[in-house]
Amino acid sequence: MLPRKAVLNVKPYQPGKPIEEVKRELGLQDVIKMASNENPLGPSPKAVEAIRKYAGNINRYPEGGCFYLRQAIAKKLKIKPEQFIFGNGSDEIIGLILRAFVNEGDEVVVASPTFLMYEAASSAHGAKIKVVPMRYFKYDLKAMKDAVTKNTKVVFIANPDNPNGTYVTRYELEDFLKGLPGETIVFLDEAYFDFVEEQDYPNGLDYLGKNNLIVTRTFSKAYGLAGLRVGYGVSSPEIIKYMEAVREPFNVNSLAQIGAIGALKDKDFLVRSKKAVREGKKFLYSEFKAMGIRYVPSVTNFILIEIGSKSGEVTERLLKKGVIVRNMKAWGLENFIRVTVGKESENKRFIKELKKIIL
């Protein structure tokens, strides 16, 4: 039995190892995970309380259109409810845009290195993928625009980017959006939006209606709900209508919807999460400089650091000490690792173990 030809070209996404798996495989008791850009503070307490109150109702199917979550986010962002689509994490929105608009052989433009799911999902849909290298760990939007033709259906832009932690400025985005073909959709992934504090960072929602643009965000990062898998996309009602037509029913489970509504109400938790990242990066930057380690300044909750040719070995040695970080080989960054900003104790433990290995 043979699969579709497009499937043969797909490189499966390999997630970071979970804590439980590392404990089981290596026989460790104390393991910290700094690999998957999760919130080290845990979930929002208001989200947990909302889930606890609702848990007795999980014998019923979820509300298929995420009605109450839709209303809550629409009110918060001051955008019409019909402009939203919800997914099992914002990852699902990638698949929905491709399923709704990309035929086999249509062009998709992606950068490299960036979030691996853009290319993997596009390959699975049989798209012709045009890969544009980054420059100095940043999107080269001029080169990406040059790669766009009348056959380009989707351009993927992560802002901020994963795994680089860099961002596209307001001027760069506005210049890119000018004069794109009318059939080209710009997929602006703002999964790390909540962490950015730079003044020239553009809010993608400000550009809705000016292009075929969809902006996606998630509750997995700053809100600490990665295990619930809930994200959303915002676009024109027309684009949303076609995506809804190919969305699976009940794709966002009840507890995810309830938890996300609770998290939206928890402003204090969001403030604490951003503060922890800000202070954690300051500490890690200082330690990297003292150790002579090059890093890419990040506007997110993770940092890309250059370890050298033994980055794979360093990753494995850290793992054996119960510190999970991300080996960047899958992104073609063989000399790098990516580390998520953790709690103060986790950041210090990571630095302590790293010093033992490389100094």
Image (cartoon, rainbow, N blue to C red):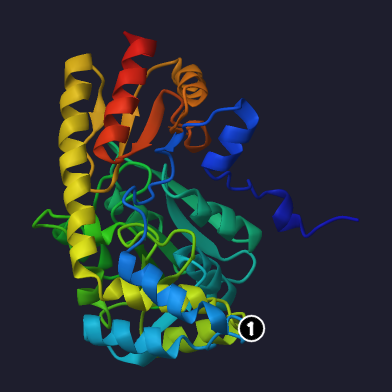
**Is residue 144 shown above or below 17?**
below
Q: Nearer the viewer, residue 147 or 114?
A: 114
**Is residue 3 shown above or below 135?**
below
Q: Name the residue: 81% across, 57% down.
A: 3
Image quadrant occupied by the C terminus: top left
Q: Name the residue: 52% across, 67% down.
A: 92
Q: Is residue 175 visible?
A: no
Q: In this view, does 151 lie to the left or right of 156?
A: right
Q: Which of 212 and 353 is in front in this view?
A: 353
Q: Name the residue: 17% across, 60% down.
A: 271
Callout 1: 10 Å neighbours few (<14), some, many (20+)? Answer: few
Q: Nearer the viewer, residue 44 or 221?
A: 44
Q: Is residue 352 left or right of residue 111?
A: left
Q: In this view, does 162 lie to the left or right of 119?
A: left
Q: Which residue lies furthest to the right in this view?
A: 1
Label 1, on which residue? 59
**Is residue 314 shown above or below 222?**
above
Q: Nearer the viewer, residue 43 or 64?
A: 43
What is the three-letter code of the residue carrying label 1? Asn
Q: Is mark 1 on a helix, strand or loop?
A: loop
Percent position of residue 143, x then y: 33, 49
